């Protein structure tokens, strides 16, 4: 090694630098650059999405149902039993009710117990980031980075309105993995592997939408059989049929057994009520939005590049599009699954072959672990200095204090306040569990709340022996209650208005009996 040449830059400070030092620094920087380059692109994408979602964390708490979802999960943890009947309302107390999302609710409750509201935010952000990353990773194996990233970004934008700390986001990565496994089997003209059944078991315990996972088997099985040589079609049919039967049985591995299969029917049988629940409404194109933009972009791209798809994949995509147009909650299925269905034919037409997996080196594992730890540390630091909490519009704390002071027990509450009341162990008139209350009850409440039938409102107040109301200022019923004999306004702010019976304030109210909660 040549002699070290030293150059003193500051004699007073004693600071010196040598060529050896420079060489060492260059080597270290080179090693760091190499380590960074070893981190998979999809991991950078996942970490970036997770931190972005976590920074905007309060947006994930924008649904009042999050309150009662966590309350149900905590009840399961506390009592070591699963809900069989309603215990949160005084209108449906004791009526049969099961929680098809019990595992998600337990996970959210556990996350809340560990980190407060930052816990459910982190859990939801992690699930969303995992789902979009899985889509990107699947596409990147067959398409260029630019195409894969553009489609993944489109999926992210389409599903953004559904980014909430609720059970449906926890099942998103499971949906992608399940569909990817079925599509790969259809592409390879083989039956799906039996280990894939573990995903449908997990799905069935996370969210009631697992029924769609069973339905998804049929079109892909039909495609696999159709594309198989005639001599092998019978065998292929039997294999897919056997897998379908096993999947159906696997969905019964829940605390509710076979009953879990029929729970989804209660939602689909809500009739007119579905038209007034935001997530079950049809897509609205009166204003330009992400769904319209993506549809136009896909049509334009297909026309420009002359993209064609096999008949069964066309039907698959059109089916997803139809579901998204009928119910906006299905937009996430279109965003996550349509790219998986078209990537195979698309890669062939674009002339891009499947990429091979590179080996994983120790430095890659170490560098990836560092990225994960940095993302976790950043999230933990943010959670320590920034409070996470649901929006005040759904958390009428001041109104609740007044209701407790007045000893109100049978409260005619708005749906969006139901979760907060359950969270505070107050029996509710109604909440977000539409399948429990049913079409008639749900529509009657909305008709009365909106003052479309004054007689119905008065009937509900008397029939259910209501002693207080908790409604937003925008509710039409508030104006009537202000003028109604026997009722008076006792609290109001920008989010909630409370009325109580005048008799209840004077102490002459009827006695109310509520089953213990």
Image (tube, grey):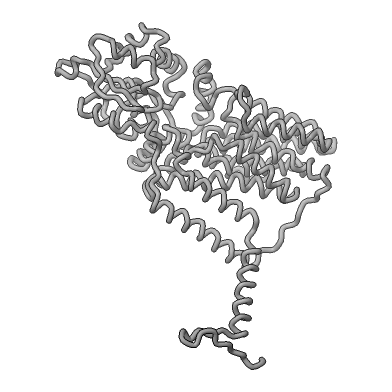
The residue closer to the viewer here, 476 or 276, is: 476
* Residue 351 x, y percent position in the rendering: 83, 47
Q: Residue furthest left?
A: 507
Residue 436 location (% of width, % of height)? 43, 23
In the depicted structure, whether residue 291 falls above or below residue 389: above
Between 405 and 194, the one nearer to me in the picture: 405
Q: Which residue is rendered at x = 43% and y = 56% of the image?
A: 381
Residue at image coords 15%, 15%: 508
Farthest residue in the top direction? Answer: 455
Quadrant in which residue 223 is drawn: top right
In the picture, residue 248 is in which quadrant?
A: top right
Q: Is residue 355 left or right of residue 12?
A: right
Residue 350 falls in which quadrant of the image?
A: top right
Coordinates of residue 186 in the picture (x, y in percent): 74, 40
Residue placed most toward the observer, 474 or 339: 474
How many marks are shown on the rendered structure? 0
Q: Foreground: 14 or 391?
A: 14
Whether 393 is drawn above or below 55: the answer is above
When the figure is inspected, residue 112 is found, relative to residue 249, above or below; the finding is below
From the viewer's perspective, tell me whether residue 390 is left or right of residue 313: left
- Residue 343 is left or right of residue 12, and the answer is right
Residue drawn at 64 percent across, 93 percent down? 3
In the image, taking residue 498 as reference, residue 345 lies left or right, namely right
Image quarter (top left, top right, bottom left or bottom right) of the C terminus: top left
């Amino acid at each position: 090694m040549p002699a070290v040449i030293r150059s003193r830059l500051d004699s007073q400070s004693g600071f010196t630098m040598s060529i050896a030092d420079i060489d060492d620094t260059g080597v270290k920087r080179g090693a760091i650059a190499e380590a960074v380059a070893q981190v998979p692109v999809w991991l950078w994408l996942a970490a970036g999405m997770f931190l972005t979602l976590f920074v905007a964390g309060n947006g994930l708490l924008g649904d009042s149902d999050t309150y009662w979802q966590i309350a149900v999960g905590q009840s399961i943890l506390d009592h070591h039993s699963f809900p069989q009947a309603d215990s949160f309302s005084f209108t449906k107390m004791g009526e049969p009710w099961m929680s098809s999302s019990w595992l998600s609710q337990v996970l959210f409750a556990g996350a809340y117990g560990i980190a407060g509201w930052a816990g459910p935010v982190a859990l939801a952000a992690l699930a969303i980031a995992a789902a979009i990353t899985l889509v990107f990773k699947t596409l990147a194996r067959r398409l260029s980075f630019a195409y894969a990233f553009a489609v993944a970004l489109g999926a992210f934008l389409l599903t953004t309105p559904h980014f909430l700390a609720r059970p449906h986001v926890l099942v998103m990565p499971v949906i992608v993995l399940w569909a990817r496994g079925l599509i790969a089997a259809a592409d390879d003209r083989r039956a799906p592997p039996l280990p894939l059944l573990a995903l449908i078991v997990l799905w069935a315990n996370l969210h009631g939408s697992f029924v769609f996972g069973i339905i998804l088997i049929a079109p892909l099985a039909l495609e696999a059989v159709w594309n198989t040589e005639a001599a092998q079609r019978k065998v292929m049919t039997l294999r897919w049929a056997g897998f379908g039967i096993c999947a159906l049985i696997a969905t019964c591995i829940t605390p509710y057994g076979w009953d879990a299969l029929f729970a989804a029917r209660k939602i689909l049988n809500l009739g007119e009520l579905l038209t007034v629940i935001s997530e079950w409404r049809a897509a609205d194109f009166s204003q330009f939005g992400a769904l319209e933009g993506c549809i136009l972009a896909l049509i334009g791209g297909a026309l420009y590049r002359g993209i064609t798809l096999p008949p069964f994949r066309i039907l698959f995509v059109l089916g997803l599009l139809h579901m998204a147009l009928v119910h906006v909650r299905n937009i996430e299925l279109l965003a996550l699954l349509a790219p998986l269905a078209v990537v195979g034919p698309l890669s062939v037409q674009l002339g891009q072959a499947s990429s091979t997996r590179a080996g994983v080196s120790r430095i890659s594992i170490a560098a990836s672990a560092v990225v994960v730890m940095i993302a976790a540390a950043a999230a933990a630091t943010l959670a320590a200095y920034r409070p996470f909490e649901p929006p005040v519009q759904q958390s009428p704390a001041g109104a609740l204090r007044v209701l407790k002071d007045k000893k109100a027990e049978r409260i005619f509450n708005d749906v969006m306040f139901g979760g907060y009341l359950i969270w505070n162990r107050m029996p509710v008139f109604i909440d977000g569990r539409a399948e429990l209350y049913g079409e008639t009850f749900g529509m009657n409440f909305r008709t009365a709340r909106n003052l479309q039938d004054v007689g119905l409102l008065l009937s509900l107040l008397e029939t259910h022996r209501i002693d207080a109301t908790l409604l937003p200022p925008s509710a039409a019923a508030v104006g009537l209650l202000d003028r109604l004999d026997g009722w008076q306004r006792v609290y109001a702010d920008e989010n909630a208005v409370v009325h109580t019976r005048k008799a209840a304030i004077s102490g002459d109210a009827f006695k109310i009996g509520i089953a213990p909660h």
